[in-house]
Image (spheres, rainbow, N blue to C red):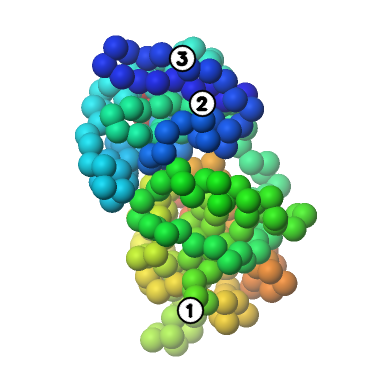
Amino acid sequence: MVTTFQLDSAGVQRLGEHRSMREASAALPEGAYTTFRTYGGNRLLRLDQHIRRLEESVALMGRPAHLDSLAVRRGLSHALRATGYPESRLRLTFAPPALFISIESFTPYPPALYETGVWCVTVPLHRQNPQAKSTTFIASATQAYDALPAGAHEGLMVGEDGAILEGLSSNFFAVLPHREEGDSLALHTEDARVLAGVTRAIVLELARALIPVSYRAATLDALGEMRECFITSVSREVLPVVKIDQQVIGDGRPGPITRALMQRFREMVEREAEALA
């Protein structure tokens, strides 16, 4: 069950409940959104980056507006206390001047997925405005998810040039041979045509200490050359991908770069996740 609150100058008002985040978002005005989770009940990771991302998105949508960070924190604290889940997934929807908080109980993905990796399939879909995280894309993503074959974890959007851009609700990374440096490896991810996710930014910070990073997208014709792949999102953190369409990636198991980033991400959460006052 998803509970939605509205935050305005008068405080926090409880609006109602829906069966899913998708339904909750569909009931709200069109705007920008960002999603994040709690750690330990009320600790959040890089909330200020999520707030700035909302402001950047509405500006790109032609509706520039500012959010009061302190008021947002107070609203989130109220929502967490009112629902009382052990862990929560939250979505902020900013339809200036209104801000909405949708919250549901959150259970992390099972450890087995991180141990064995997941299967992804490519889908013929892309964002019209990839730098703005608009709620208008949610309906298209929902339809694409409903059409995925049984057993597929995520749909990967592909550009007209064959570039693997991002997942329906994730960012995509591939480890490929570094063409300029012989047998060394580089981490490839598309930059200009994808959402600049907060989790993506964290992973790029961590990756630069491990491996050269290339902002050229991995392409479908390079699937056989990929040594490792993974997707990132707030809910998934760093999740290994071991098969795309019918192509097994590497040796079909999560690779050493992916595993190192999974561990470093979890260590970073322990250091940086901050409790709401």
Q: Looking at the image, is mark 3 or mark 2 nearer the viewer?
A: 3
Picture layout, residue 221 above or below residue 267 = below
Picture layout, residue 24 above or below residue 211 = above
Q: Which residue is mark 3?
A: 14
Give x and y (percent) for residue 66.
22, 34
For marks 2 and 1, the one nearer the N-term is 2
What crowding class fits label 1: few (fewer than 14 Cα within 10 Å), some (14-19), or many (20 or more)?
few
Q: Looking at the image, is mark 2 or mark 1 nearer the viewer?
A: 1
Q: Residue at x 58, y 73 (%)?
A: 227
- Give residue 103's mark: 2
Q: Residue at x 61, y 58 (%)?
A: 155
Q: Which residue is mark 1?
A: 161
Picture layout, residue 211 above or below residue 4 = below
Q: Residue at x 51, y 30 (%)?
A: 27
Q: Nearer the viewer, residue 260 or 33?
A: 33
Amino acid at circle 2 = Ile
Q: Residue at x 31, y 36 (%)?
A: 51
Amino acid at circle 3 = Arg
